[in-house]
């Protein structure tokens, strides 16, 4: 028996993606752990991904691979928009989505509505290589509070409208379940400015196919254009789905050359994952995903 196979779970960081499957990382060094009023949190220094954090035992973001998730969550809809000036992030207290949004020269205001103040706190102290100072950029406004209440009540009451709305949330269970309903998606649509777009992650079609299917179907009941795309995200241990939804913006309609031209014209450089060819390729669904999402 090898040294690795003989290790106990005490030596590993384990996450289950469903009842009978998951993956692990060798633990590295625990930097901080505790419990906020909302959830348990951990910050680790790991040999594979550098610093990472987990919430309720689930991997959220890491220095080493955050670009897979954040670049696609933001730039797939962002590059299709003619010039986003305002954005709302529900969740996203690590600042990675805000950092990508601030790359748009047209961006004037980013509002982060994060339920758990502790996420912002640990990100400021440990995850500078994820947010790169975005949490303290003067264009960024951080509101600690309930995203459901903001989208359904506070935002409409203030007559807010956003070019992009980003749901940078934990999986759609527990506290986050109410932020993945048809009713919530409809409320997001009402907060979008004309020509605006919503983006979110869907989960793993390998381990959570029913969840991915249900989210896409709910989005389609609200928006004219719903474009799921899929990529492998190392920290999440699986093929992972993201989606852009809009009544006007259709990122799948852009050619690879158009995406590259728009990124260049807007001065968005230094991306580690997304380019025109990748943008276009991620919308090409294999047959099993076509069947799942039909």
Image (cartoon, helix red, strand yellow):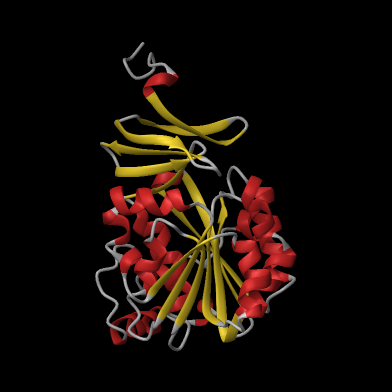
User: Looking at the picture, how far across and down is residue 217, in whole percent?
Assistant: 72, 63
Q: Which residue lies at the image location 26% right of the left edge and 55% below the top edge?
A: 129
> Would you say 288 lies left or right of 65 here?
right
Which quadrant, please, contains the C terminus?
A: bottom right
In this view, the residue farthest toward the top is 1
Is 151 in front, or is 158?
A: 158
Which quadrant, please, contains the N terminus?
A: top left
Is 294 in front, or is 29?
A: 29
210 shown above or below 189: above
User: Looking at the picture, how far across and down is residue 224, in whole percent?
Assistant: 68, 79
How many callouts does the rendering have? 0
Q: Which residue lies at the image location 28% right of the left edge and 64% below the top edge?
A: 133
Residue 294 makes an appearance in the image: no
257 shown above or below 274: below
> Would you say 256 lies left or right of 55 here?
left
User: Looking at the picture, how far across and down is residue 146, in whole percent?
Assistant: 60, 59
Is 157 in front, or is 132?
A: 157
Q: Which residue lies at the image location 31% right of the left edge and 71% below the top edge?
A: 137
Residue 107 makes an appearance in the image: yes
Is 221 in front, or is 206?
A: 221
Q: Quadrant of residue 132?
A: bottom left
User: Looking at the picture, how far across and down is residue 276, in whole percent?
Assistant: 37, 75
Q: Quadrant of residue 271?
A: bottom left
Q: Which residue lies at the image location 48% right of the left edge and 76% below the top edge?
A: 87
Q: Quadrant of residue 71?
A: bottom left
């Amino acid at each position: 028996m090898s040294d690795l196979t003989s290790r106990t779970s005490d030596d590993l960081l384990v996450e289950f993606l469903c009842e009978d499957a998951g993956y692990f990382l060798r633990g590295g060094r625990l930097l901080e752990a505790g419990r906020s009023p909302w959830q348990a949190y951990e910050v680790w220094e790991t040999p594979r991904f550098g610093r990472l954090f987990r919430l309720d035992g689930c991997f959220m973001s890491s220095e080493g691979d955050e670009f897979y998730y954040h670049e696609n969550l933001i730039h797939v809809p962002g590059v299709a928009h003619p010039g986003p000036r305002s954005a709302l992030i529900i969740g996203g207290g690590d600042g990675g989505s805000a950092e990508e949004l601030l790359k748009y020269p047209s961006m004037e205001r980013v509002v982060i509505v994060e339920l758990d103040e502790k996420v912002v706190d640990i990100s400021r102290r440990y995850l500078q290589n994820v947010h790169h100072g975005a949490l303290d950029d003067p264009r960024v406004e951080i509101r600690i509070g309930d995203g459901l209440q903001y989208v359904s009540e506070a935002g409409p009451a203030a007559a807010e409208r956003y070019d992009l709305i980003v749901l940078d949330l934990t999986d759609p269970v527990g506290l986050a379940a109410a932020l993945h309903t048809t009713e919530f998606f409809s409320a997001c649509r009402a907060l979008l400015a004309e020509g605006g777009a919503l983006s979110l992650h869907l989960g793993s079609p390998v381990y959570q196919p029913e969840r991915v299917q249900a989210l896409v179907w709910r989005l389609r009941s609200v928006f004219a254009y719903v474009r799921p795309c899929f990529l492998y995200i190392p920290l999440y241990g699986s093929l992972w789905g993201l989606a852009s939804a809009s009544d006007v913006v259709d990122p799948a309609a852009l050619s690879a050359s158009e995406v590259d031209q728009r990124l260049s014209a807007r001065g968005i450089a230094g991306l580690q994952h997304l380019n025109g060819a990748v943008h276009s390729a991620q919308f090409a669904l294999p047959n099993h995903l076509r069947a799942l999402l039909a």
